[in-house]
Image (cartoon, grey):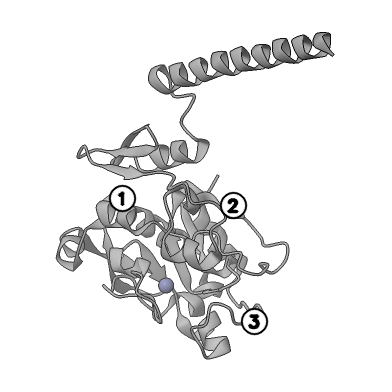
Amino acid sequence: MRVAVIVLLSLLNCTLSHQGIKGDFAELRQNNSTDSIPQSAKKLINSYKDLVIGFSNNNIILKDGSKLLWDDGIKNKSSKLQLEKPDLKDMFDQKYPVGQLKSSPTLNFDPGRIRNEPFFLKMYGANEKEVRKNLTEITWCPKLVGQKIMVTRINSIDKKLTEISKELDEHPELKRYLTNIGGTFTWRNISGTNRHSMHSFGMTIDINTAYSDYWQWACKCTNENAVIPYKNRIPQTIVDIFEKHGFIWGGKWYHYDTMHFEYRPELID
Ligand SMILES: [Zn+2]
């Protein structure tokens, strides 16, 4: 019995000192290298170099010296809470699938729909006036459409959309989806919510609504818990061109919005 106790105590001692060593290493990494930065925080840093300059003590560090909390420590958030009060880490919980969808999105699978608002307000402007200062006009698909649209210059989104529109211009068979652009910039909330629409920032474009499908139109409701059969009429070529330039597509969400493309390069590998 006595031998057993001694063995148990020495095992415990060994475990504790091992944990101590591991703890020390973790702290060293935190202070001296980039190894302890979460992979997804690295994606934010790499995708938004003009805004995000680093990561320290569970915060991302912005260029103006301010910080935004990375992980609020709340575990097992419901999809409602993730939509309403996400931290930065939550934005990466669902992996956005690049390329052709293999099957319709499963219940509440909405990669990219979880957005930490303070981050986007910092990046594109804290209010309508601030956002408007960064807007510029571009000509959408000069050959096929020629519509003037207002988009932000932040993250060179004006240049990226000009490039996307040039590529789409080479596809006359897609003209009907690209005419009569549904909208780019409008300072507003998402319908039925108190959350900002990404259209408030000028980094989002809705293509022709006449060939688009939206979950709220299908269920004639704004109830997130509604059971909604998937629907899409947007050709994959359009999706591929947008994704190549860092835009995600709302057609990959359970709460689908197939006209909607939004600049979220941190979600595209
Ligand atoms: Zn939209």
Task: Report if the beta carbon of the residue with label 2 is closer than 8 angstroms to ligand 1.
Answer: no
Above or below 209: residue 184: above
Residue at image location 44% in from the left, 45% down from the top: 71
Q: Secondary structure at mark 1?
A: helix
State which mark lies toward you, 2 or 3. Answer: 3
Q: Which residue is mark 3?
A: 227
Query: Quick check: 177 left or right of 125?
Result: right
Q: Which residue is mark 2?
A: 95
**What's the mark number on residue 156?**
1
Q: Quadrant of residue 9?
A: top right
Residue positioned most to the right: 1
Amino acid type at mark 1: Ser
- Among all residues in the image, which is located at the extreme front? 2
Farthest bottom residue?
A: 220
Image point 57% across, 69% down: which residue?
A: 251
Quadrant holding the C terminus: top right
